[in-house]
Structures are given as structure tokens and as C-alpha cells.
Image (cartoon, rainbow, N blue to C red):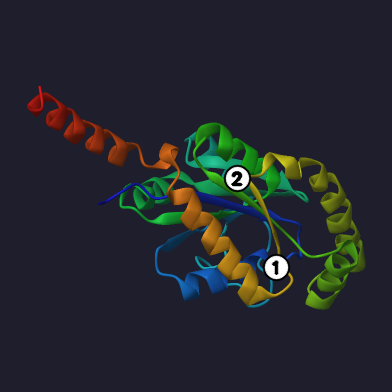
């Protein structure tokens, strides 16, 4: 029976491995669709337009805000990040489970608009491991890394707003765990309203026939 897709919000500290986790999830399972965010930050080495992000400038981004073109947007480390509205709504309607990889500010806005969404927070096993991964990326200057660690400290205060925590220690295990959480969430009554309505109507017809 066809059903509406689940909106999955994946957040986590910068350097926690969210991007790698999502990439592996999409490669392993075919029921997911990734919503690509728009950002005003500069591309990192190897990032392609329309794959990692839609890269734009501040003026164009703010124009889309005025047109209600995002389901959420936020500022992070002096740059805008936002989730384009049209793609997300189209994919959910055809039954795809849509992944949004966004920051905590945006995640909480999504939960307000879509209470049935599933919020997952990805973290490394320790703060020391987080610092090691940020340094190991080799893409940012030490002052930017310090900013990201400071930001992570702030973000840690909001983890309780999420539905589940996923510790990204072993990638393959983490991918399986995340998929199991989404699979379980898909079966929650709040996400199967159409099925519940249909079976209720069928049962009512049986009840009338038994009178």
C-alpha cells in the first residue's frame, strides 16, 4: 500500500561524518532521496554544484527567502544554509523518505512545520575524536576549526530536541542503525494515517454486515 514518505532530519557536529554517513546510506538503500541544500559558503575542494550543495550568493539567497522558497534556513559560521521547498514536498508525496542534512537551528524549524519528521543527531564517540576529524580533513584553517568546536559546544545543549542519537564510530554499523530507526519510525501510527483510515472503513463495513 502506497504511503507518504518520512522526512528525516540528520544533524550533528561539523566533523561528525554526516556527509559520509548519508552518502553510504543512499548507496546501500534505494528508498531514500537526498534534499540538496542551498548555501552561500564557498565550495570545498571536490564539491560539485548540485551534488554537495547549490552554491549561491547572499543576494540571491535572500531573494528566495522573500519568495518563501525554503522550508527552513539558518545562518551558520557567517553563511546561509537553506532547504528548497518544492523538491522535498514532491518526493514525500510519491513515498520517498527524504533526508535533510541540516544544522540544529534548521532542524528545530522543520520539527515545527512537520511534527511527524524524524530528527537524528550524529556524533563521534568523543570530543577528542571530533577535533581529530576536523584537523584530519585538512580543508580549514586552525581558527575556523576553533570556531567549529566552539559551535559544537553550543549545539550540544540542543541534542535533547532530537528523537535519536547515532554515534558514528564504525560507518557500516552506523548506517545499519540509522536505517533501522527510520524503518521503525515508518511504522508509527502518526505516519500511517492513510492506512489506518482505510482499514477502519473496511472494518466498519464488516461491522455493518454483522448487524
61 or 33: which is nearer to us? 33
Which residue does the image show at 56% across and 39% down from the upper left? 110
Q: Callout 1: few (<14), some (14-19), or many (20+) C-alpha neighbours within 10 Å? A: some
- CA separation, marks 1 and 2? 30 Å
Q: Callout 2: few (<14), some (14-19), or many (20+) C-alpha neighbours within 10 Å? A: few
The residue furthest front is 210
Which residue does the image show at 60% across and 45% down from the upper left? 59
Which residue does the image show at 91% across and 59% down from the upper left? 146
Q: Is residue 107 left or right of residue 203?
A: right
Residue 189 percent location from the top left of the image: 42, 39
- 199 versus 126 height, above or below: above
Residue 49 percent location from the top left of the image: 53, 67
Residue placed under numbered mark 2 in the picture: 59
- Label 1 or label 2, whichever comes before in sequence order: 1
Local SS, label 2? helix
Q: Is residue 43 left or right of residue 197?
A: right
Residue 87 percent location from the top left of the image: 40, 51
Which label sits on residue 102?
none
Q: Is residue 182 left or right of residue 133?
A: left
**Residue 60 seen:** no
Which of the 4 quarters of the picture holds residue 149? bottom right
Q: Is residue 148 left or right of residue 88?
A: right
Which label sits on residue 17?
1
**Residue 142 seen:** yes
Which residue does the image show at 44% across and 50% down from the upper left? 186
Local SS, label 1? loop
- 2 versus 129 height, above or below: above
Amino acid at each position: 500500500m502506497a504511503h507518504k514518505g518520512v522526512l528525516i532530519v540528520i544533524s550533528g557536529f561539523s566533523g561528525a561524518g554526516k556527509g559520509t554517513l548519508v552518502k553510504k546510506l543512499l548507496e546501500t538503500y534505494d528508498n531514500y532521496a537526498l534534499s540538496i541544500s542551498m548555501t552561500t559558503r564557498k565550495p570545498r575542494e571536490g564539491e560539485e554544484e548540485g551534488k554537495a550543495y547549490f552554491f549561491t550568493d547572499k543576494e540571491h539567497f535572500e531573494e528566495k527567502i522573500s519568495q518563501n522558497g525554503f522550508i527552513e534556513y539558518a545562518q551558520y559560521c557567517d553563511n546561509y544554509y537553506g532547504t528548497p521547498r518544492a523538491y522535498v514536498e514532491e518526493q514525500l508525496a510519491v513515498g520517498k523518505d527524504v533526508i535533510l542534512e541540516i544544522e540544529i537551528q534548521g532542524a528545530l524549524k522543520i520539527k515545527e512545520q512537520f511534527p511527524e519528521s524524524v530528527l537524528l543527531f550524529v556524533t563521534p564517540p568523543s570530543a577528542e575524536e571530533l577535533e581529530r576529524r576536523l584537523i584530519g580533513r585538512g580543508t580549514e584553517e586552525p581558527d575556523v576549526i576553533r570556531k567549529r568546536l566552539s559551535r559544537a559546544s553550543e549545539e550540544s545543549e540542543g541534542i535533547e530536541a532530537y528523537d535519536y542519537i547515532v554515534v558514528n564510530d564504525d560507518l557500516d554499523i552506523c548506517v545499519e542503525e540509522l536505517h533501522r530507526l527510520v524503518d521503525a519510525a515508518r511504522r508509527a501510527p502518526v505516519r500511517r494515517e492513510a492506512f489506518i483510515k482505510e482499514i477502519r472503513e473496511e472494518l466498519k463495513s464488516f461491522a455493518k454486515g454483522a448487524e
